[in-house]
Image: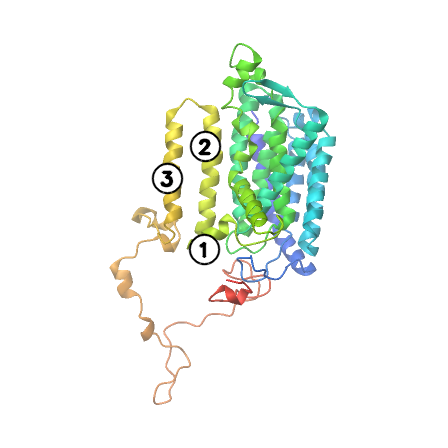
Amino acid sequence: MGQPVRDYLLTLCVTAAVTYLLTGPVRKFAIAVGAMPAIRARDVHREPTPRLGGIAMFGGLCAGLIVADHLFNLNGVFELSNEPRALLSGAALIWLIGVLDDKFEIDALIKLGGQMIAAAVMVIQGLTILWLPIPGVGTVALTQWQGTLLTVALVVITINAVNFVDGLDGLAAGMVCIASAAFFLYTYRLWYGYGIEAAAPATLFAAILMGMCLGFLPHNMHPARIFMGDSGSMLIGLVLAAGAISVTGQVDPDAMKLFEGSERQATHAMLPVFIPLLLPLTIIAIPAADLVLAIVRRTWNGQSPFAADRGHLHHRLLEIGHSHSRSVLIMYFWSALIAFGAVGYSVHSASLWIVLVIVGLSAVGLILLLMPRFTPRAPHWAEAFVPPRYRRRSRADHEESPDAADVTVRGQQDSDGSDMASPVPERAPVSVGVSGVNGATAIGPRSRFTNRDRADSPR
C-alpha cells in the first residue's frame, strides 16, 4: 500500500460534509418531533434548543466507513480486520439509546446498561484488549474475562467523560476533535512509520471522528442552533474509546525493533512511546478529570453519581467571570496542551525543549484562568481577521460614535407635537428561526434575559 494521506483526507472531508449537510434537516426533524426539552437549572442556554444532532453525526460515521471501504489504501483495513464492523455495531446501539434519551429522557442506569452492552457487542466481534505492555514486566497476556472487563470499563469511562463535558456550545465536539487529531498523528506514525498494520483501524477511526466533529461544529458553536445530545456525545465517546482499544494491547513492542535485548528491556525503554496507548485517558484528560470530580462531589454531598448539577469545570469558568466563548477556548487550550504534549513526549522523550514548552504553555493557561476580565487586543495589521471586540478603537472612532442621549427615535414627538425623524434607520422584522441570524432560535428570536432567574435557574 502507498502512503494513504490523501485517502484519509478524503475520508475526513466526506465525513465532515455529510455530517454538516445532514445537521440542518435533522434540526428541523428534532423541532417537529418535539426533541426540545425545557430549560433546566443546570443549563447555560436560555431558550429551548433542539437536540438529536447525533443523528447527523452517525450519518457521517456511516459515510466515512463506506468511502474508506472503497479506497485502495484503506480497504485493507476491512479485509484484514473485523474492527470497523464491530465499531459500527456498537455505535449503532449506543446511538439508538442516545436518540431515545434525547426524546424521552430515559433513566441513567438504563443508559449505563446500554453502554455496557454496546461495549460487549464490540468485544464479541473482536474489538478488545488482548495484552498490555507493562514497564519492567513485559507484555502481559490477558485472559478473555480480563480483556472484556478492561475493554468495557474503558468504553464506559470514555463515553461518560465526554457526556459530562458536553455543557457548553461547541465544547464536547471541539475537545474530541482536538483529541482525535492528536491520536491520529500518533497512530499514523505507528502504522506508516513503523509498518504496524494493527494500528491501521485506529488511524481510520481517528480520521472519521475528526470529520464528525468538524462537520457538526459550525451548527453547534455559540450561539448553538442544535445540540448533539446524548445521541452525539455518547457516540463520539464510543468512537474515541474504540480507537484507543484498537491500538492498545494489539501493538507488539518488539514489532517496532527500536531496541535490542529482552522483551522486558524493550518495553521499559519504550515507555514514552506507549504513554498514549497505556493511558488513553490522557487524550481526554480534561473530561476524565471532570468526571472524577463530579462523582466525588456528588457522592460527598450524599447524591447519586448520576445526579445532574452545576459543578462541572465549564460551570466554574462561567462563575469566575469568563464568557461563554472564552470558557470554551480555555478548555480547548488545555485539551490541546495535554493531548499534543503527550504525543510529543512519546516521540522525543529525551528532548528537554518539549518539557519547557509544556511548562511555558501551562503558565500561559493559568494566567488566562486567573484573568477572566482581560481582553487581548490584536495588532493593527491583524484587526481584519479577528472579531470586533478584539480590535483597537482609535480616538477618532470614539469621537465619531454618536452619544446615546443625542440619538432620537422615530415616532417620538417634540414639544410642538411634530414627529422628529430618527437618524437611525428602522430595522426590518426578523423571521422566526431564520438561519444565519445571530440569536435566532428554533422557536423564536433570542430572549433578552438580564439574569438567569428568568431561565428557572436557582442562581
Q: Which residue is mark 2?
A: 341
Percent of width and height locating residue 135:
54, 20
Using a 10 Å C-alpha cutoff, classify the residue at mark 2 as few (fewer than 14 neighbours), some (14 to 19) or many (20 or more): some
The part of the image, by quadrant, that contains residue 365 is top left
Q: Which residue is mark 3?
A: 363
Disc 3 is placed on an element classified as: helix
Residue under the point 39% across and 52% down: 372
Given the image, on which type of amino acid does mark 2 rest?
Answer: Gly
The answer to which of 88 and 156 lies nearer the viewer is 156
Percent of width and height locating residue 255:
58, 16
Q: Which residue is mark 1?
A: 319
Given the image, on which type of amino acid does mark 1 rest?
Answer: Glu
Q: Earlier in the sequence, mark 1 or mark 2?
A: 1
The answer to which of 153 and 283 lies nearer the viewer is 153
Disc 1 is placed on an element classified as: helix
The answer to which of 146 and 416 lies nearer the viewer is 146
Given the image, on which type of amino acid does mark 3 rest?
Answer: Ala
Q: Which numbered circle lies on residue 340?
A: none
Q: Is residue 345 left or right of residue 1?
A: left
